[in-house]
Amino acid sequence: MKKTLLALLSIIPLGLTSCVSTPNDNVDTPPIVDDSGDQDDSNDDNKDDGNKDDGSQDQDNDKVKILPSYTFKSKTELVDNEYQTTLTILDLDNKVIETTISKTPKANPYLSIDTNAEKAAFYASYKVANSPLDAKYRTEAGLLSGKNTEDKFMPLDNSRIDNTKVNNYRSTTMNYVLDEDSGEQVAYLLFSLDGKYTPIYKDGAYFTMNELASYTIGFGALPANQNYDKYEKMQDKSSSTWWKYGRVNRGPFSGPVKASYKHESWFVGMKQKEISYTETDFGNSTYYNPTEYDSQYQTMPYIKDNKDGTYAINSGTPGDRGVLRFVFTSEYENNQSEKNSSSTTKKNYKNQYYRRCYYTFNHYNDWHEYLNYEDGWGEVFGNMTRGNAYGKNSPHSEEMFAPIPTDSSMDEIITNFNK
């Protein structure tokens, strides 16, 4: 069944009904389509319903284009004993391009998903969250809002970058879905080079490479399933709450400030103490080739299957949690009374120039900067890239600073890429 341009919100289980897309009369858009019918088009190999299971939204060539610079508003109201969320998109002239409606039960339907078997069944027929309230409900029940599968762990595996056009450009466009009543940022908009977008809900839980990087840029924090320190108590809590999607190791990251860290790199504003950084594990179970780096880290997957329907974070052996890390500028409060707490400075945080996210695939040796769009990763830099051994800052001992990509708007990046 063909859906409208912005049938962004998908059908999900447990009684959450699908969206109705309402185009503006002044624009050339398809008629209203209610995709909550009983038709089963799963066997239609030629279908293109525009509504992706991963939350991204197609934009057909003959339809109105949604630009990253447009305005996105969300309003949730109680109608006939259920919540109705309306997403409205306005162009640069403040003209309504399209509205999309989703409906959510008044009471949280996910709270009945409690046992490991119930969680396994939920993820077996999984759909991403379709509204800010849906995401909030899921988090309250320890369930994801974003994609639940990914085997990507290297930016090169995760990208479709044309080096001649894109990968030295960082998007400075920071666009949000705003709540119409409160003005609160309820979702950050992750755009792709194809002009598709995915809402990353502030109250949602995420673990994939693109979604996590986008969340850290948009909100300067970690999603609920990642917001744990690395110690045993929090590891247990993470696994019991989030099943196999819990992640740990939220903590401050200061770069090459100690002799043992001299092989690490300085990030934007770090050495000058203009901004503070926080790190977290990226818990993908695939690591690098041990013959290429340090074999101690070729051990077990990040999450181990206990063979009884439960999962746990590997701990106790060096390298069990792997070598993949995200480091990003954050707004976490300084609280040194808590073990492994995150510290930050409010100075410069709201300056877009300092909103940065970096990813290491070999335990703080080499890095890519996230460029603030889907599969957008800058050139690799760091210790081994410049010819040093793993964890050693020799023979090249000079300080290493992260390269700074050229800033550009997302509109311009998409235009240049598709020339």
Image (cartoon, grey):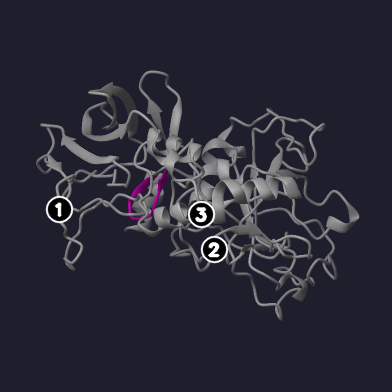
Secondary structure beneath dot 3 equals helix
The residue shown at (20%, 43%) is: 64
In the rendered structure, the answer to whether residue 146 lies left or right of residue 352 reads left
Q: Is residue 418 above or below residue 216?
A: below
The residue shown at (17%, 46%) is: 35
The residue shown at (61%, 64%) is: 306
Q: Earlier in the sequence, mark 2 or mark 1?
A: 1
Question: Which mark identifies residue 116?
Answer: 3
Residue furthest out toward the top: 181
Q: Where is the C terminus found, in terms of image quarters?
A: bottom left
Where's residue 339, x and y in %? Answer: 80, 39
Question: Which mark identifies residue 155?
Answer: 2
Where's residue 36, x and y in %? Answer: 18, 44
Q: Look at the image and give the residue range highlighted in magenta.
A: 189-198
Give the number of the mark in front: 3 or 2: 3
Question: Which mark identifies residue 2?
Answer: 1
Which kind of residue does numbered mark 1 sit on?
Lys
